[in-house]
Image (cartoon, helix red, strand yellow):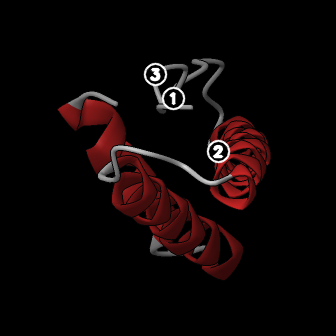
Amino acid sequence: MNTSDKIELLRLAKSNTRLQRLIKKHEGYKEQLRLIRKQKVFTAKEEQTVRELKLQKLRNKDEMIRIVRSMKSVEGSVESSFSAIPA
């Protein structure tokens, strides 16, 4: 995500508690994945956890995009932002 997208996301999150929670969840998924990936060898359970975290992170991103688009349309903007939110 580029800097302007982050700024816009945080601006919109100030008035949307659901978006705030999704941002925190997204960051949590990223951190969990980072910690697991530090290991050189994965157990089958860890590989499954990685797949589940990636899926949760993607669903979370989709929900953030829906909220942002909805908020932007309310603001009168047709601009579709946040296509660069990392999956």
Would you say 35 lies left or right of 59 here? left
Q: Secondary structure at mark 3?
A: loop
Q: Residue at x 48, y 32 (%)?
A: 85
Q: Residue at x 36, y 54 (%)?
A: 34
Q: Which mark is residue 68?
A: 2
Q: Amino acid at mark 1?
A: Phe
From the top left corner, tell me how far across and down residue 64 is, in percent.
67, 49
The quadrant holding residue 19 is bottom right
Q: Amino acid at mark 3?
A: Ala
Of tags 1 and 2, the one toward the viewer is 1
**Crowd class of label 2 (few under 14; some 14 to 19; many from 20; radius 10 Å):** many
Q: Residue at x 66, y 19 (%)?
A: 78
Residue that numbered label 3 is attached to: 84
Label 3, label 1: how many angstroms apart (C-alpha)?
Answer: 5 Å
Marks 1 and 2 in Cβ contact (< 8 Å)? yes
Q: Secondary structure at mark 2?
A: helix
40 lies above or below 15:
above
Marks 3 and 1 in Cβ contact (< 8 Å)? yes
Quarter of the image that includes the N terminus: top left
In front: 36, or 6?
36
Would you say 67 lies left or right of 80 here? right
66 lies above or below 36:
above
Residue that numbered label 1 is attached to: 82
Q: Secondary structure at mark 1?
A: loop
Q: Residue at x 68, y 54 (%)?
A: 53
Of tags 3 and 2, the one toward the viewer is 3
23 lies above or below 70:
below
In front: 13, or 34?
34
Would you say 47 lies left or right of 52 here? left
**Crowd class of label 3 (few under 14; some 14 to 19; many from 20; radius 10 Å):** few
From the top left corner, tell me how far across and down residue 65 is, in percent.
68, 39
